[in-house]
Image (tube, helix red, strand yellow):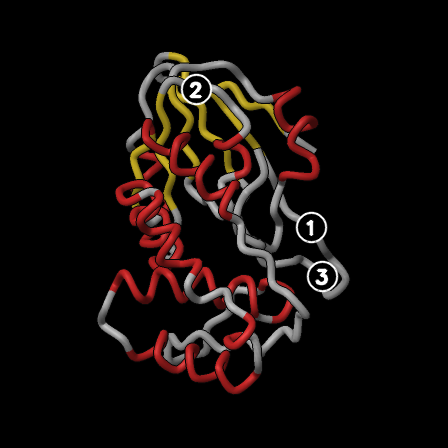
Amino acid sequence: MKPFLKWAGNKYAIIDRIKAVLPSGNRLIEPFAGSAAVFLNTDFENAILNDINTDLMTLYRYLQKDGQRFIGYCQTFFVKEMNDADTYYQFRKIFNQTGDERLRAALFLYLNRHGYNGLCRYNNKGEFNVPFGRYSKPYFPAVEMTQFHQKIQTATLTNRNFVEIMEMARSGDVIYCDPPYVPLTETAKGDVEFAFVIVAAQPVVTVAV
């Protein structure tokens, strides 16, 4: 199942490799959910999806709760007349200033699909500042959003520090982590990924490379 968002570090392309070493368990916990590719392509009974990005989790909550109504609302922003630099920067400004959570969630999707390379970046003031992407016809992921809505009904969505999420783990839970990290050298690249299952009080670690 393909994620509906463009996302740096998205694991969809290597999901089979991850699943091959992912432990079995009762509940999946993702402290760094991102595009939720692992959740979308596994079959745990329950899940906790967490991310420190409030805009991301607010979008997920509206999609979880409102389904097709919210998808239809988001689609109104994906018309030819709204695919130009002036409109993009106007919407980006509204996104950064609005207190309307539903509008901000829909605009987050618009910015994700119309912005440069699908990046998600904020300045020191907390303002989204990704430039216009100049795509001829940005894709509206209606099918992927519908699948996400159906799948996410069994998930708990949180927006907390990852330490708090790790402390929520119980026996039988599987935690998949794909955290950002500070490179040790200027040329270092990549992510550190790991998954483990909580058995009683002892985690058994499985590394996904």
Q: Quadrant of the N terminus?
A: top right
* Amino acid type of the residue that numbered disc 2 sits on in the rendered structure: Phe
Which residue: 52% across, 24% down?
Answer: 42
Q: How many marks?
A: 3
Locate residue 37 relative to residue 47 in the image: left or right.
right
> In terms of depth relative to the viewer, which is nearer, 71 or 195?
71
> In terms of depth relative to the viewer, which is nearer, 48 or 142?
142
Asked which quadrant contains residue 8, the reply is bottom right
Measure how far apart labels 1 and 2 are at the Cα level.
27 Å
Q: Residues within 10 Å of mark 3 (few under 14, many from 20)?
A: few
Label 1, secondary structure: give it: loop
Look at mark 1 in the image and give the residue it sits on. 190
Look at mark 3 in the image and give the residue it sits on. 185
Measure how far apart labels 1 and 3 are at the Cα level.
12 Å
**Residue 37 in the image: above or below residue 159:** above
Q: Residues within 10 Å of mark 1 (few under 14, many from 20)?
A: few
Which residue: 71% across, 61% down?
Answer: 185
**Residue 5 in the image: above or below residue 132:** above
* Amino acid type of the residue that numbered disc 1 sits on in the rendered structure: Gly
Q: Quadrant of the C terminus?
A: top right
Which residue: 30% across, 66% down?
Answer: 103
Q: Residues within 10 Å of mark 2 (few under 14, many from 20)?
A: some
Q: Are marks 1 and 2 in contact (CB under 8 Å)?
A: no
* Amino acid type of the residue that numbered disc 3 sits on in the rendered structure: Thr
Measure how far apart labels 2 and 3 are at the Cα level.
37 Å
Label 3, secondary structure: give it: loop
